[in-house]
Image (cartoon, rainbow, N blue to C red):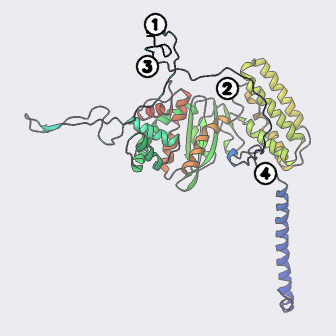
Amino acid sequence: MNREALLSLSPADLVALILAQQAQIEALTAQVADLQARLNVPPKTPDNSSTPPSRGEKPNRPDHSPKKKRRHGRPGVARPLAEHPDRVIEATLDACPHCAHALAPADQPGIHAYDHVELPPIRPVVTRIHRHHGICPCCHRRVTASAPEGFAPGSPFGPGLCALVIHLHVTQAISFERLSRLLGEVFCVAVSEGAIANILARAQQPLVTAAVPIAEAVRASAVVGSDETSARVGGKTWWQWVLLSSTAICHVIVPQRAASVVVDFLEGRRPEIWVADRYAAQDGHGAARQLCLAHLLRDAQYAIDEGGTVFALGFKFLLLRAMAIGRRRPDLKDSTLRQYLGDLERRLDRLLSGAIPDTPAARRLFNAMRRDRDDLFRFVIRRDVPYTNNACERALRPSVIFRKVTGCFRSHWGAKVYAAASGIATGRLYGLTALQALANALAGKPVMQAA
């Protein structure tokens, strides 16, 4: 407003204008203070947070790399020869290439053996079924031969081809369009995108049925780990949970990220130890909890990056010592592990008895460890408890790749089929390949069995 406009205002209007400007100034001042505080906050990186490595900034390599040290020689390793080759060619000489003297096989005892590996021409095996029908000459009724076992009418695609389609789509993240082209160009099978969708839809029921005993095996386990990641389903953000034990891996894709997902999955069961990060929805599902030390290590590094030196640095070294004990645990005696546990507890007592840190991140970590200190070192004397939640993160990594490559799921049933295909990961625990696990599931056979 200009001077003339201000002079034309009444005293009441001037007071209202000044109060409005004062409120705006206070809001802007608070915003400036918040932005200035953010300038001093260290950036989130894969080293100090759960930011995935793909989103971290990678440094440029120097133009002139330093001279590499000379590597010590070591014996070479060749590809092992096939145990049972399909064909053996004996390459012998009829005559000496130098003097033309005739040679017999007995004159050539030495052999230089090597394998030549090649793929045969790939073509589908097409079986034509003729179901004969006619009129019975006795009762004059129409009769039709039954379909041979394993060759029921309906879909022309056999279980092996269906398992391959699901394997390529689920584990290799090949979209419908590229999968249709791949099947035609490599396997000489014409399969449309709609046919691929129908194959997946028909596989839903047997895959879901095969996932039931897998989920039950996880519920019955004494130690269960869990983690979650986002998933896009029908244009909306859902959440994919993984719950695993040493014998089974189960995936669940649902719209919520709340603790109710785990409660519904457990169906009243309560494992002895629950291994997870510090996300609130992961707490309270087991009789006791083991926190992931890898997550805590990144939190400690972030506190150090923010300026925390005393507690954060000491806590980082304590975590590294605990993880080193975890790696050596198979070679240590129970009595030694109990001594190590007492040493870790005493070191933690000294850290938590110090002054409260000044920096926000270190202070939050300090208060959290005072609250959750009992959940740090349960793995030391429980050999079946891991000290990190990395197994869950490894189980979710294929899902993250699938999400990035395909954009996730257009339908709810597609997400359900993908989650039910967790039998692939469980089958690998028993030595099954992805194709074997899928073939077992589609045929109604158990996945949790050795190859």
Tell us which disc is closer to us: 1 or 4: 1
Q: Amino acid at mark 1?
A: Ala
Q: Are marks 4 and 3 in contact (CB under 8 Å)?
A: no
From the top left corner, tell me how far across and down residue 265 is, in percent. 57, 40
Badge 2: residue crowd in 10 Å (few <14, some 14–19, many ≥20): few
Specify the quadrant of the image occupied by residue 86.
top left
Q: Are marks 3 and 2 in contact (CB under 8 Å)?
A: no
Nearer the observer, 159 or 118:
118
Question: Is residue 271 found left or right of 108 in the rendered image?
Answer: right
Q: Amino acid at mark 2?
A: Asp
From the top left corner, tell me how far across and down residue 69 is, in percent. 79, 30
Q: Is residue 294 visible?
A: yes
Nearer the observer, 327 or 29:
327
From the top left corner, tell me how far across and down residue 321 is, in percent. 81, 30
Instruction: Residue lying at the far right in this picture: please name it.
Output: 355
Circle number at residue 106: 1
Badge 4 is on which residue?
A: 43
Q: Amino acid at mark 3?
A: Ile
Question: Is residue 284 found left or right of 399 in the rendered image?
Answer: right
Q: CA distance from mark 2 to mark 1?
A: 61 Å
Badge 3 is on which residue?
A: 89
Question: Is residue 83 found left or right of 272 in the rendered image?
Answer: left
Badge 2 is on which residue?
A: 384
Q: Are marks 2 and 1 in contact (CB under 8 Å)?
A: no
